[in-house]
Amino acid sequence: MQRVIGSILIITATTGAGYMYGVELKAYLEKMLYLRYVISLIKGEMEYSRAPLAEIFQTVGARVREPWAAWLKTTAREMDRREESAFARIWNRCIDRCLKEAGLKSEHSILVKELGTFLGQVDGDTMDHSLQMYLNRMDLEIEKLREGLASKRRIGNCLGVMGGIFLVVVLL
Amino acid sequence: MEGINRKTQILNILAKSVRKTVLEAEDGFDGLQEVRLRIGQPLRIVVQGTERELQRNGHSHIVTKEEIRETMDYISRYSPYAYENELRQGFLTIEGGHRVGVAGKVIMEQEKVKNIQYISSVNIRVSHEVIGCADALLPYITKNKQVCHTLIISPPCCGKTTLIRDLVRQISDGSQYVKGCSVGVVDERSELGGCYLGIAQNHLGTRTDILDCCPKADGMIMLIRSMAPQVIAVDEIGTSEDIHAVEYAMQCGCKLIASVHGLDMDEASRKPVLGDLIKRRMFERYVVLGNGEHPGEIRGIYDERGSLLCRG
């Protein structure tokens, strides 16, 4: 009886781990989709109001959820302090400081930092164009994540169950 | 308090190294009128009409390209795209209503100025309001506590904008000569209100609505339709569209205060479209300014027939 209960527990645990892996992948995709939404809000505000970046970050920061809101508001505050000669430095520092808990992969963190290299530094039309190109790149990244998601989740679930059974067989 | 604010506003937009030099040289900031930066040239300030060259470590502080770039980043809040329209005119207005003039390489597109690139000179002009400068004028341009249609005629740099600003404030708030009423201001070059992000940085009164960076002719009609002002104020009318819009506003029941460049009544009367308006006695008062003893000196106030009411 103890063996049966033990086997069931092992299989349940490994299946759960496999399932959680799939959930995390899905949550990461949603996170990237939300990041894309935040950047599209910035683009929209920029096109509509042509306000300075700090104003746009404050406005968008009030409309999005954490940790994106804190990130944008902190960036706006740092910009208003006017103590850094280059905007990209403020942008990178705020990403490192405020987006830790967002848990972005390093390649996606670099992708967000790239935005700081041209944001605000060119004329309005060029910036609209650059932001659209940037959003297209984000779409590609999201598409890459989405493409692998279904198969990865399936593999995670199967591996969870199979791994549990394998462990039970080995232990028995 | 205002002095401290002004000091912070000016220091905040200067490159850090320039900030340090200015701070060491200028304690007060009350008399500070201009800070001039030119690449490769000494940093200069104008205090109470006197120009001074600033020193760093015993030598002239020579302004570098990086300092100009850093200053422009701070002035534009790292967002030059947001100030494209203003930069096209060669200046932008910052918090506090201070005016920043720039010069550099002009980029043209379809024979119009598109932008200024490679900025080589920055001139920061500190905003100074002269509260009460219209006190002496107000009794002459009001009747039964109502404002008369008034045209201010003045050569450049004689204080007409400062005078209109104070007139707007007093008419809006009300005084012993005029009942406070809603005033619409069309501020095409952000000179009257010194607006920053749409908010007037100068005192324009509690009943004033301001259309910032708006062409005068369009702005006057927009104000009449949307804000129902009792008085409309515009600075430097010049084109025939402006003058036709002035006439339209006068026929809509609004009282008008406008200014125009000119030496005297005769010169204003000879202007193509404006002259016709003067001959038809559309304006009830004419104020001629000069700067004989000081800017804003009133040389004469005339009624609609051109009769002298007061000599300065």
Image: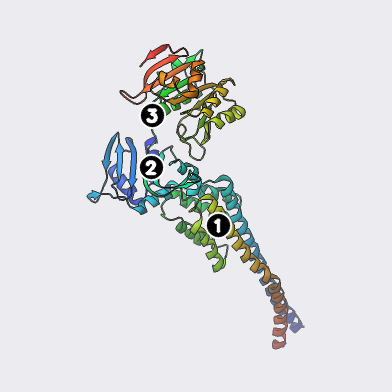
Q: How many numbered marks does the figure carry?
A: 3
- Residue B305, placed above or below residue A61: above
Q: In the picture, which quadrant includes the C terminus of chain B?
A: top left
What residue is rendered at 27% in x and 45% in y?
A: B54
Q: In the picture, which quadrant includes the N terminus of chain B?
A: top left
Q: Are marks 2 and 1 on the same chain?
A: no
Q: Are marks 2 and 3 in contact (CB under 8 Å)?
A: no
Question: Which residue carries the number 3 mark?
Answer: B156
User: Is residue B152 in view from this perspective?
Assistant: yes
The location of residue A133, given as percent across then percent down, is: 58, 59
Label 2 crowding class (10 Å Cα cut-off): few <14, some 14-19, many 20+? many
The chain holding disc 2 is B
- Comparing A44 with A74, the one in front is A44
- Residue B44, placed above or below residue B223: below
CA distance separating discs 2 and 1: 33 Å
- Comparing A130 with B171, the one in front is A130
What residue is rendered at 43% in x and 56% in y?
A: A86
The three-letter amino acid code for the residue at tag 3 is: Pro
Q: Which mark is residue B10?
A: 2
Question: Which residue carries the number 1 mark?
Answer: A130
The location of residue B136, given as percent across then percent down, is: 40, 18
CA distance separating discs 2 and 3: 26 Å
Label 1 crowding class (10 Å Cα cut-off): few <14, some 14-19, many 20+? some
The three-letter amino acid code for the residue at tag 1 is: Ser
CA distance separating discs 3 and 1: 43 Å
Asked which secondary structure carries label 2, the reply is helix
**Sequence-earlier tag: 2 or 3:** 2
- Residue B73, placed above or below residue A102: above
Whether residue A102 sits left or right of residue B66 in the image: it is right
Whether residue B167 sits left or right of residue A153 in the image: it is left
Q: Quadrant of residue B90?
A: top left
Q: Are marks 3 and 1 on the same chain?
A: no
